[in-house]
Image (cartoon, grey):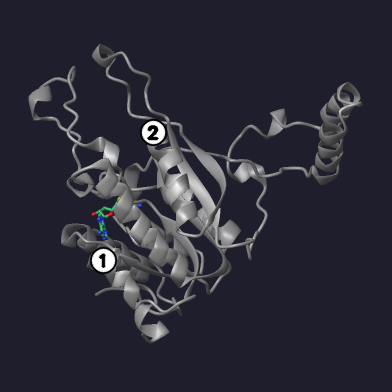
């Protein structure tokens, strides 16, 4: 397929098997937020009028856990084929599926590098009658096809506010003193001390869930402030970012705003209309936009 034909396009189709049309090694990065299996049919008791409130998302309707994981594995295998060597991938997931997803990411050929924690600073409240903690964390798995080709360092304080409590060279020296006779640990600590930079990135990002003007009607829309940093760290302007599960198009919007391109899929025509609206707003606000005009096909 002509690479220009896929550039800045969201296909209103299932990513699988449609991704088979993408050429080998044609994308520089993957950024995706697949359907989450675990949201199926939980009645939310304890809310006023709870009878009508169900958090079942139509796009989470897999018949079994096996069917869900096998579908995602097929998508990831295609993602591996279409990725360039050194491409990074980021995949949002819930805590109860992380080990399964790590396994299928690796069986697709990628190397899992780190699980990143997104701390949602404005989580939905826990419903007291359910005696549960509120869910203020979501995970993002970072993986690569071989060694990462791009790593654009970012000051950690763009990701969260814990910078002032970071470990210091003096802290590490103190530990080296304690582990003096344990060769391997001591060596590792010495390497860490040498590598320590001001504002080293760690696996935490803090940001509220999507609210205000940015929020569309999509129920699991991810904020651009959570998408953009990872896209900037692991890709360069002009690169192509793949998202097989576009939702309200946050990956596409983050790519456009940072001078990248995208290709993606969204099965639901209603969500594609939300994406189209975001494209229209972007083009209206950026009359000088020089890239290929984004489109839904
Ligand atoms: C978790 S949402 C993505 C939300 C997105 N990150 C955003 O910020 O708007 C997952 C999306 O995948 C879509 N989807 C589910 N199965 C799909 C498939 N086979 N192909 C393409 N899209 C699919 C759903 O309709 C849903 O919008």
Is any atom of residue 10 visible in this view?
Answer: no
Q: Is residue 177 left or right of residue 1?
A: right
Q: Which is nearer the N-term, disc 2 or disc 1?
A: 2
Q: What percent of the width, then of the height, locates residue 275? A: 28, 62
The quadrant in which the C terminus is found is bottom left
Whether the residues at callouts 2 and 1 have beta carbons within 8 Å, the answer is: no
Q: For residue 96, which numbered disc appears in the image?
A: 2
Is any atom of residue 32 visible in this view?
Answer: yes
How many marks on residues?
A: 2
Give the structural element (helix, strand or loop) at label 1.
helix
Residue shown at the point (17%, 58%) measured from the top left: 270
The quadrant in which the N terminus is found is bottom left
Looking at the image, is 229 positioned above or below residue 124? below
Quadrant holding ligand 1? bottom left
Looking at the image, is 114 positioned above or below residue 12? above
Q: Is residue 188 left or right of residue 79?
A: right
Residue shown at the point (87%, 24%) measured from the top left: 174
Q: Residues within 10 Å of mark 1 (few under 14, many from 20)?
A: some
Q: What percent of the width, then of the height, locates residue 18? A: 28, 71
Q: What percent of the width, then of the height, locates residue 54? A: 15, 32
User: Mark 1 — residue?
Assistant: 276
Q: Is residue 274 left or right of residue 110?
A: left
Between tags 2 and 1, which lies in front?
A: 2
Give the structural element (helix, strand or loop) at label 2.
helix
Q: Is residue 55 left or right of residue 252?
A: left
């Amino acid at each position: 397929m002509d690479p220009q034909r896929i550039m800045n396009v969201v296909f209103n189709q299932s990513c699988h098997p449609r991704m088979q049309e993408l050429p080998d090694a044609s994308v520089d990065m993957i950024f995706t937020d697949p359907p989450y299996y675990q949201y199926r049919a939980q009645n939310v008791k304890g809310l006023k009028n709870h009878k009508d409130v169900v958090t079942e998302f139509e796009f989470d309707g897999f018949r079994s856990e096996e069917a869900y994981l096998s579908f995602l594995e097929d998508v990831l295998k295609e993602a591996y084929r279409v990725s360039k060597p050194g491409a990074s991938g980021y995949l949002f997931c819930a805590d109860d599926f992380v080990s399964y997803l790590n396994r299928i990411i690796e069986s697709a050929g990628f190397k899992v590098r780190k699980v990143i924690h997104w701390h949602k600073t404005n989580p939905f409240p826990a419903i007291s009658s359910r005696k549960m903690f509120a869910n203020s964390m979501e995970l993002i798995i970072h993986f690569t096809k071989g060694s990462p080709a791009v790593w654009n360092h970012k000051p950690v304080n763009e990701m969260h506010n814990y910078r002032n409590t970071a470990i210091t060279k003096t802290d590490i020296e103190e530990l080296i003193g304690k582990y003096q006779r344990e060769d391997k640990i001591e060596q590792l600590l010495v390497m860490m001390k040498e590598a320590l930079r001001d504002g080293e990135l760690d696996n935490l990002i803090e940001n509220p869930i999507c609210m205000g003007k940015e929020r569309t009607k999509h129920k699991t829309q991810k904020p651009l402030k959570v998408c953009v940093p990872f896209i900037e760290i692991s890709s360069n302007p002009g690169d192509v970012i793949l998202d097989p599960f576009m939702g309200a198009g946050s990956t596409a919007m983050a790519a456009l705003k940072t001078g990248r391109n995208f290709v993606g899929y969204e099965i639901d025509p209603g969500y594609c209309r939300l994406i189209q609206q975001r494209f229209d707003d972007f083009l209206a606000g950026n009359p000088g936009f020089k890239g290929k005009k984004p489109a839904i096909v």
